[in-house]
Amino acid sequence: MESYLAALDEYFCARYSDYVKLSALEGYEMPEVLYVAKDGNIVRRDPSVMRLTGQAKREELLARLKKNAGDVNFTFGYAFIPFSDKFKNPLRKGTFSKLLPAALHACGETAESAGEKLEIEPRFWKKIVKGSLYPEKNLILALALVCAMPIKIATELLASRGFFFDPENVRDVVVEYLLQNGVTNPAMRDRCLAEYNLTSLPIRRNPAEEKEEAHEDL
């Protein structure tokens, strides 16, 4: 396995925290979450002990999780602005549309160049840029990936919409890894997404890359 995929798996095992799904995996061994401290009191261990990184058979468990994983994330790229927000937004400094220009500039991108890398109709993207539509989380994550955003900038854009990197979400953990570790090569990025069956991110594929991928599948 390529080193970056192995590093992703290691990160995922240490970060992913949907304990309901983890504990349902065949072969998962529930760790002792309670223990007796030196003072005789019953103490609860940090929930992180339940993550895959602490499992003796974590490679097998991760393989089962990947096999059964399906991308169920919200796929729409935008949402309509509530009527009440239309009066509040002109006074707000931290809205997505107001943070976007500086975020794109820091990545060497413009609204036009970034939009060309996203699988979204130009008319809707223009409305998002102007602030007349709200971007959904899936679109912000895709934007961060195609623009190779620093994790801090991506986090700020997510927060402007009330979103965050959720450790219980497979997609969020994988995207967080890619941004934190600067995995900007499109082929490597797409390989990481495919490894975890993440198909809903609205990223426009390069036709040359699609032809090369189809050729490899023959």
Image (tube, helix red, strand yellow):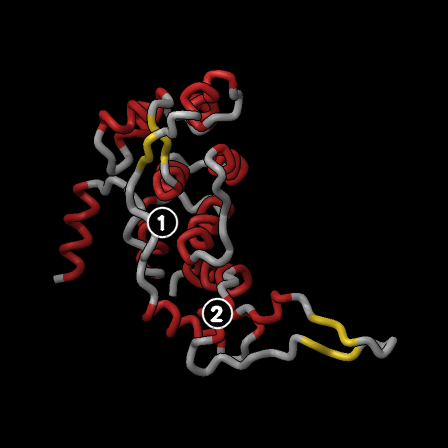
Q: Quadrant of residue 62?
A: bottom left
The residue that mark 1 highlights is 189
Query: Please, is residue 163 above or below residue 42 in the view?
Result: above
Amino acid on which the number 1 mark rests in the picture: Arg
| Residue at 31% across, 46% down | 201
SS for callout 2: helix
Query: Please, is residue 167 above or below residue 206 in the view?
Result: below
Q: Nearer the viewer, residue 178 or 29?
A: 29
Amino acid on which the number 2 mark rests in the picture: Val
Where is residue 151? Give x, y as percent.
51, 40
Q: Which mark is residue 206?
A: none
Where is residue 164? Give x, y as percent.
50, 44
Q: Quadrant of the C terminus?
A: bottom left
The residue that mark 2 highlights is 20
Cα separation between marks 2 and 1:
28 Å
Q: Quadrant of residue 64?
A: bottom left
Where is residue 66? Give x, y as percent.
36, 67
Query: How many numbered circles are shown?
Result: 2
